[in-house]
Image: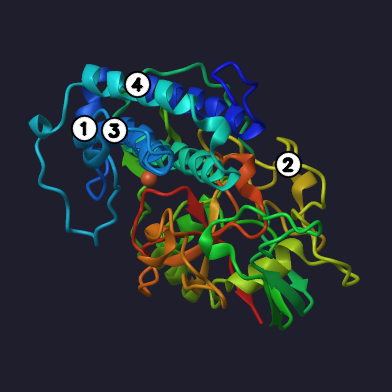
């Protein structure tokens, strides 16, 4: 029989590591600011403090028949929100429990679940782990929108700025791409992926041209000067544009990718006489090969991700120059298809053929197949390297402005 002293499985160890990461993130918020709601369409920060443990409890504790010690908190912290813009929450600060109560709940959840982690399936542990890693990123969006005096500022290395690059369009030859992933690996073992990553299927892509770099702030500035509204991450101050950084505002770096909504990205592309890529075109540019060999695991090849290949994995809080990581280029020479900001595609988020929900988490994807969410591919500076797998799909509403998401244009 497994006991408390049994060696944790690798996934259980990763979950423990993930907990330390999210603890560090919550520690960056000054305590009273946990009751702030920096993004109107999301919960107050205190919700997320309780949500990660309540989610794990509801996912792992309930199937293991572990008796609940706080059904009220299990329910209060169970679900996040994604309302249409303008449909914001009306709750009060006093509707939420004190920080010490939530901290005590979190501690007890962890202690109790730790006793059953070694008997928990790999699928449930993977869901718990990746759910936490995804929240670590989306919590960064909320933290970004929190005023700087409400945060504990860590030491942050600066990054040299360079001139905006000359944008070029690269020819991407047509070919077949594989979307999604198979449910089993070659040895017949179940592969982990979220419900929306199945089934694996091929799609045919015609030739097109794609910009080598993500659209930069410098390029978008011309659009703003032509009359477009500035994106959320820009701020006009004393006659100059600034980037709203995580820890400080800096003069707008013209060589960084612009972070924009789907609507802004689409409008820019139309203004430039181009369009956004489809999800399949993104795959072709990112994972296709020149001579038609098997698609790559990552744009740069099959080597595991590291910081030389791109700005992902939580090493930085803000973007870097679009030219900074040439070692991450795809076979066709396209830069930063993974890292330094997600990229909008023109593909509405819909299930792949053969999709079915996870019984343990039926709403993960299915409640977003409403035609009002679009697929994003790639990764941001705050995306964990585990989520860089080729089949991973992200999605958001077309006008949600708080994301670390940019875009690039294509033309036929
Ligand atoms: Fe969640």
User: How far apart in space, not on screen, are marks 1 and 2 (Cα)?
Assistant: 35 Å
Residue at disc 1, CB closer than 8 Å to ligand 1: no
Residue ID for mark 4: 108
User: Residue 396: x and y, percent?
Assistant: 41, 60
Q: Foreground: 58 or 252?
A: 58
Q: Residue 66, relative to residue 39: is it above or below?
A: above
User: How far apart in space, not on screen, are marks 2 and 3 (Cα)?
Assistant: 40 Å
Residue ID for mark 3: 68
Quarter holding the N terminus is: top right
Residue 336 relative to residue 156: left or right: right
User: Residue 275: x and y, percent?
Assistant: 54, 75
User: Residue 375: x and y, percent?
Assistant: 50, 65
Q: Closer to the N terminus: mark 1 or mark 4?
A: 1
Q: Tell me, for residue 36, which label it has, or none.
A: 1
Q: Can residue 406 be seen in this view?
A: yes
User: How far apart in space, not on screen, are marks 1 and 4 (Cα)?
Assistant: 25 Å
C-beta proximity under 8 Å, tags 2 and 3 = no
Q: Closer to the N terminus: mark 2 or mark 4?
A: 4
């Amino acid at each position: 029989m497994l006991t408390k002293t049994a060696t944790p499985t690798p996934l259980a160890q990763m979950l423990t590591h993930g907990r330390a990461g999210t603890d560090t993130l919550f520690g960056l918020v000054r305590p009273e600011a946990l009751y702030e709601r920096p993004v109107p369409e999301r919960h107050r920060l205190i919700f997320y403090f309780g949500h990660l443990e309540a989610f794990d409890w509801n996912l792992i504790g309930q199937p293991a028949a572990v008796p609940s010690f706080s059904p009220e908190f299990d329910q209060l912290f169970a679900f996040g929100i994604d309302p249409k813009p303008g449909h914001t929450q009306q709750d009060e600060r006093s509707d939420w429990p004190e920080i010490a109560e939530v901290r005590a709940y979190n501690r007890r959840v962890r202690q109790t679940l730790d006793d059953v982690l070694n008997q928990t399936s790999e699928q449930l542990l993977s869901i718990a782990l990746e759910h936490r890693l995804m929240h670590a990123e989306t919590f960064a969006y909320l933290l970004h929108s929190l005023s700087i005096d409400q945060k504990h500022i860590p030491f942050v290395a600066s990054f040299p700025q360079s001139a905006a690059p000359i944008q070029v369009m690269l020819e991407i030859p047509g070919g077949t791409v594989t979307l999604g992933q198979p449910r089993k690996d070659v040895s017949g073992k179940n592969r982990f992926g979220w419900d929306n990553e199945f089934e694996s299927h091929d799609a045919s892509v015609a030739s097109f041209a794609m910009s080598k770099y993500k659209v930069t702030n410098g390029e978008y500035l011309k659009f703003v000067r032509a009359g477009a509204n500035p994106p959320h991450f820009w701020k006009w101050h004393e006659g100059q544009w600034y980037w709203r950084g995580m820890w400080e505002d800096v003069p707008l770096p013209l060589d960084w990718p612009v972070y924009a909504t789907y609507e802004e990205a689409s409008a820019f592309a139309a203004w430039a006489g181009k369009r956004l890529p489809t999800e399949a075109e993104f795959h072709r540019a990112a994972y296709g090969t020149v001579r038609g060999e098997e698609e790559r695991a990552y744009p740069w090849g099959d080597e595991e991700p590291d910081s030389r290949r791109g700005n992902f994995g939580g090493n930085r809080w803000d973007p870097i120059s679009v030219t900074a990581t040439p070692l991450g280029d795809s076979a066709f020479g396209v830069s930063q298809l993974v890292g330094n900001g997600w990229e909008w595609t023109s593909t509405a988020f819909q299930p792949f053929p053969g999709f079915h929900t996870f019984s343990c988490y039926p709403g993960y994807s299915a409640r977003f197949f409403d035609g009002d969410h679009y697929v994003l591919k790639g990764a941001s500076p705050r995306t964990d390297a585990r989520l860089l797998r080729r089949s991973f799909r992200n999605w958001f509403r077309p006008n949600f402005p708080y994301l670390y998401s940019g875009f690039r244009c294509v033309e036929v």
